[in-house]
């Protein structure tokens, strides 16, 4: 990965129409690897190219550039205490049940105040403050994370009252000027208009040099949550200060920077926030997973972001006006791609294993679960980097109140076949509620007494695997009972960058597949949880604990993690690689090797001519796999005790193998060679496409049928894009 690769990503997003232009600065291990302007600063009234010194409305970066550092400076001066009520500094704020909200609650977005205020019925800062004093909290302070612009409007007012200066004057004198940020501030001078990137159009008027945020705009352009304009170079100076550079001491003591950038949210709060800074919340999902656990940053609504990683002395700055001119832009895919590339460059040369969600949770000291009453949906293949079951790790975690385990198909030990009874886990002594027995959803009795349901389950990257549906059902029931869900993410073992196969017909959705998806869905379990919540509108508080050091292109054996069979017949990674294709025929009257030592590496039946089938498939030249005749006798499952003739699959190049095409080739070959014996109609449940089934029955070439999947796959990729984290 090099600078031109980063540049190519930006050019591609501009070409796709997601933003008019941008200025990017990326530093890796203290060295600037990219500083470049792309595209256009403005498209109306006339096209103007972006330049490195273009000034952008940074929106919510104001929170971490001005307001949070100002508060921390006043803390250093002993003029503010983080755990004192904000009403101590602004008495009128404490009315209507807000008296218990502390400065720390506001800085971490755990004040549980409304996200914003109406943009009519008041004028100016004084009018905004009057509205805020009349607000009532939406919950008890500290009880949950709720990102709120109101929090930082209040903090901006606290700065004004304690320092005796308006926030814009204070930030200019105490933050921007000491760091040499010459082009940074609120309400930019009209003389700078020629360098400012305009934003959206309101009432037919282009907003240009005026803050885009409607609340900040109505307040006169100065607010604690938005209003700052800046350049990428100025933000780079700011980032270096928070990396401990030579200018750091000009605004804050090293201890203060450390405090601001460590988790400061209440114990038990699922979203990790520093003092102003985001560390690991839903808002950071496009950036945080690509950097170390010590990293932190923030994003802005106008299309801006800053992410800083002290562990690798790296940072990424993205400034764009993605709202220009029609408010339709989307910078989030670009953020994820740039963060992934920058993080990979920072890790270059390191061969460290992937940190799964449970590893990340451990590294945070289980802060997100402190004091929580926890149920865990899991099985034995969910383990931390030291090989310990997640169930055992959480059982012994300090401050975590483990109440019960929940198990998917195959049970908590991942070895059972058929219905699984509830019971008790011998190692932890916890009750185990089976979700593959009398019920496939957690019942109210099972969920009684819980406030958090943690899900740590493996997936095999294939549409037809029940664990993901069990997760979705658990999310639905947890949401109905107002129980928070935390998904500890894990790798997709067969790569999360590959999407293949027919998309399931909507009316074929079942317990096997929760949503219409292609055979290889190309997502992790955490991403699937985000997809399910978004596409099915599941009303649940969901937090995905992201992996670190994970790349979508990795096969499982490249992650540094040990393979533990997620179910009885996926004993080796090679079997998981073949599973999307070979399992496609399993609904018919064939054996796929269950009850042998090589499940999904063989396929056959007593009525199949294995030699003829191998010869036919060999002539089809399916890339990435060798197919030979074989004879085997399953000990159980289909054709138990009977000699089966069929074929053996040997992977020769897993990167070239289209396993979904392999499955279709199998169906077509069996239909052609044994039309009177092969129960082709029974493949519909896993093939998932009636159109493809009918085409196969009509003798169409499998390659042509596979080509017909392209449009559906592209539509799925566009939908999937919104939920990706890596």
Image (spheres, rainbow, N blue to C red):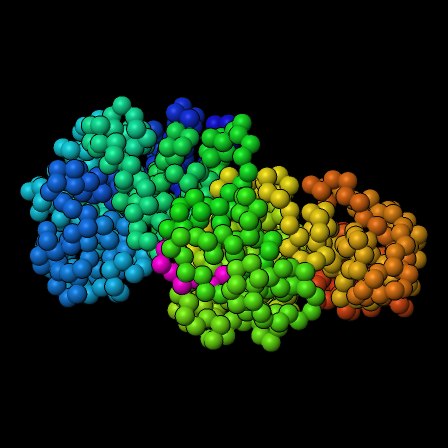
Residue 474: image location, x then y, percent: 51, 67
Q: Which residues are magenta?
A: 368-376
Q: Residue at x 36, y 45 (%)?
A: 279
Q: Residue at x 27, y 45 (%)?
A: 276
Q: Residue at x 46, y 33 (%)?
A: 342
Q: Height in image: 40 above or below 439?
A: above
Residue 252: image location, x then y, percent: 21, 33
| Number of numbered markers | 0
Q: Residue at x 81, y 48 (%)?
A: 649
In the rendered structure, the answer to whether residue 460 lies left or right of residue 456 reads right
In the rendered structure, the answer to whether residue 177 lies left or right of residue 556 reads left
Residue 351: image location, x then y, percent: 55, 32
Query: Is residue 141 part of the magenta span, yes or no?
Result: no
In the figure, residue 509 lies in which quadrant?
Answer: bottom right
Q: Height in image: 242 above or below 118?
A: above
In the rendered structure, the answer to whether residue 325 lies left or right of residue 707 reads left
Residue 327: image location, x then y, percent: 35, 51
- Asked whether residue 67 is in view, the answer is yes
The foreground one among 127 and 19 is: 127
Give the residue furthest to the left: 164
The foreground one among 49 and 591 is: 591
- Asked whether residue 300 is in view, the answer is no
Query: Is residue 370 part of the magenta span, yes or no?
Result: yes
The foreground one among 347 and 684 is: 347
Q: Height in image: 544 above or below 276?
A: below
């Amino acid at each position: 990965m090099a600078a031109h690769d980063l540049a190519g990503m930006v050019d591609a997003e501009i070409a796709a129409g997601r933003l008019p232009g941008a200025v990017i600065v990326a530093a890796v291990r203290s060295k600037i690897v990219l500083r470049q302007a792309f595209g256009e600063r403005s498209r109306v009234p006339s096209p103007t190219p972006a330049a490195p010194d273009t000034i952008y409305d940074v929106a919510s970066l104001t929170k971490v550039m001005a307001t949070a550092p100002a508060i921390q400076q006043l803390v250093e001066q002993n003029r503010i205490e983080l755990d004192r009520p904000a009403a101590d500094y602004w008495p009128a704020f404490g009315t209507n049940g807000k008296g218990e909200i502390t400065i720390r609650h506001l800085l971490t977005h755990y004040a549980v105040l409304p996200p914003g205020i109406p943009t009519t019925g008041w004028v100016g800062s004084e009018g905004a403050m009057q509205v805020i004093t009349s607000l009532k909290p939406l919950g008890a302070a500290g009880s949950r994370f709720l990102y709120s612009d109101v929090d930082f409007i209040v903090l901006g007012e606290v700065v004004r009252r304690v320092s005796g200066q308006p926030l814009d004057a204070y930030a200019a004198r105490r933050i921007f000027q000491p760091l040499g940020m010459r082009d940074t501030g609120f309400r930019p001078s009209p003389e700078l208009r020629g360098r400012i990137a305009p934003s959206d159009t309101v009432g037919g008027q282009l907003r240009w040099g005026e803050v885009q945020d409607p609340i900040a705009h109505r307040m006169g352009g100065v607010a604690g949550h938005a209003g700052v304009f800046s350049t990428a170079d100025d933000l780079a100076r700011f980032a270096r200060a928070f990396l401990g550079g030579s200018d750091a001491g000009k605004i804050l003591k090293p201890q203060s920077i450390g405090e601001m950038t460590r988790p400061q949210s209440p114990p038990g709060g699922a979203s990790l926030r520093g003092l102003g800074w985001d560390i690991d919340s839903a808002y950071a999902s496009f950036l945080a997973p690509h950097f170390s656990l010590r990293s932190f940053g923030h994003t802005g609504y106008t299309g801006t972001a800053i992410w800083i990683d002290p562990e690798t002395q790296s940072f990424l700055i993205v400034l764009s006006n993605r709202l220009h001119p029609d408010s339709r832009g989307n910078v989030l895919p670009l953020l994820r791609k740039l963060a992934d590339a920058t993080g990979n460059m920072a890790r270059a040369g390191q061969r460290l294993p992937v940190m799964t969600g449970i590893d990340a949770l451990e590294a945070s000291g289980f802060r997100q679960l402190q004091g929580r009453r926890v149920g865990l949906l899991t099985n034995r293949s969910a383990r931390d980097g030291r090989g310990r079951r997640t169930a055992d790790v959480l059982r012994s975690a300090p401050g975590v109140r483990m109440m019960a385990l929940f198990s998917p198909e195959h049970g908590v030990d991942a070895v059972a076949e058929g219905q699984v009874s509830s019971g008790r886990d011998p190692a932890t002594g916890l009750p185990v509620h089976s979700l593959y027995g009398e019920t496939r959803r957690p019942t109210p009795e099972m969920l009684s007494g819980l406030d958090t349901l943690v899900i740590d389950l493996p997936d095999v990257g294939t549409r037809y695997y029940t664990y993901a549906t069990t997760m979705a059902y658990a999310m639905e029931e947890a949401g109905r009972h107002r129980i928070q869900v935390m998904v500890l993410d894990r790798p997709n073992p067969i790569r999360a960058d590959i999407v293949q196969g027919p998309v399931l017909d909507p009316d074929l959705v079942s317990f096997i597949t929760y949503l219409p998806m292609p055979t290889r869905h190309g997502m992790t379990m955490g991403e699937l949880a985000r997809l399910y919540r978004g596409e099915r509108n599941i009303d649940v508080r969901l937090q995905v604990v992201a992996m670190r050091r994970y790349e979508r292109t990795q096969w499982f054996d490249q992650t540094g993690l040990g393979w533990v069979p997620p179910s009885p017949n996926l004993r080796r990674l090679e079997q998981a690689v073949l599973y999307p294709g070979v399992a496609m025929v399993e609904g018919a009257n064939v054996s796929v090797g269950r009850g042998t030592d090589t499940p999904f590496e063989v396929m056959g039946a007593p009525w199949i001519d294995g030699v003829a089938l191998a010869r036919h498939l060999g002539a089809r030249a399916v890339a990435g796999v060798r197919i030979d005749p074989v004879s085997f006798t399953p000990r159980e499952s289909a054709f138990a005790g009977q000699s089966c003739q069929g074929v053996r699959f040997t992977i020769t190049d897993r990167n070239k193998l289209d396993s979904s095409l392999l499955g279709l080739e199998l169906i077509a070959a069996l239909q052609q060679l044994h039309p009177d014996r092969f129960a082709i109609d029974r493949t519909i449940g896993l093939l998932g496409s009636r159109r493809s089934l009918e085409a196969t029955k009509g003798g169409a070439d499998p390659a042509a049928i596979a080509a017909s999947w392209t449009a559906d796959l592209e539509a799925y990729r566009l939908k999937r894009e919104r939920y990706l984290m890596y």
